[in-house]
Image (tube, rainbow, N blue to C red):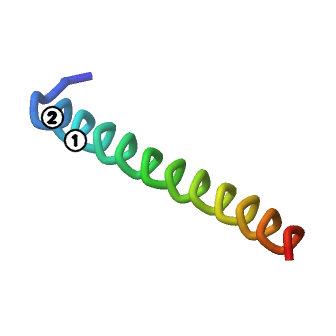
């Protein structure tokens, strides 16, 4: 199998994009979780 340097670069770029996408997804999940917890705490206090 011939390995092209271009394919390696594309794979690296895709890996970086996947890392960024998963990072954003984790942030959104964390924010949603904190938001839900915060909302329930606020509701219980009233």
Q: Residue at x 86, y 77 (%)?
A: 46
Q: Is residue 9 above or below residue 27?
A: above
Write down the residue under mark 1: 13
Mark 1 falls on what kind of element? helix
Cα separation, mark 1 vs mark 2, equals: 6 Å
Disc 1 to disc 2: CB gap under 8 Å: yes
What residue occupies the far left of the structure in this picture? 5
Q: Nearer the viewer, residue 39 or 9?
A: 39
Classed neighbour count for the residue bearing mark 2: other residues with Cα under 10 Å, few (<14), some (14–19), many (≥20): few
- Check disc 2 and report the residue beneath it: 9
Which numbered mark, 1 or 2, is in the foreground of this view? 1
On the image, the x and y values in percent for residue 12 come to 24, 33
Q: Is residue 34 left or right of residue 16?
A: right
Q: Quadrant of residue 9?
A: top left
**What kind of element bears circle 2?**
helix
Q: Tell me if mark 1 has few (under 14), some (14-19) or many (20+) residues whose alpha carbon lies within 10 angstroms of its own.
A: few
Residue 33 x, y percent position in the rendering: 69, 57
Horizontally, is 24 left or right of 28 in the view?
Answer: left
Left or right: residue 9 compared with residue 46: left
What's the residue at 77%, 69% (across, down)?
Answer: 42
User: Which residue: 47% across, 47% down?
Assistant: 22
């Amino acid at each position: 199998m011939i390995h092209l340097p271009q394919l390696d670069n594309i794979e690296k770029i895709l890996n970086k994009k996947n890392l960024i996408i998963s990072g954003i997804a984790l942030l959104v999940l964390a924010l949603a979780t904190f938001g839900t917890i915060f909302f329930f705490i606020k509701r219980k206090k009233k």
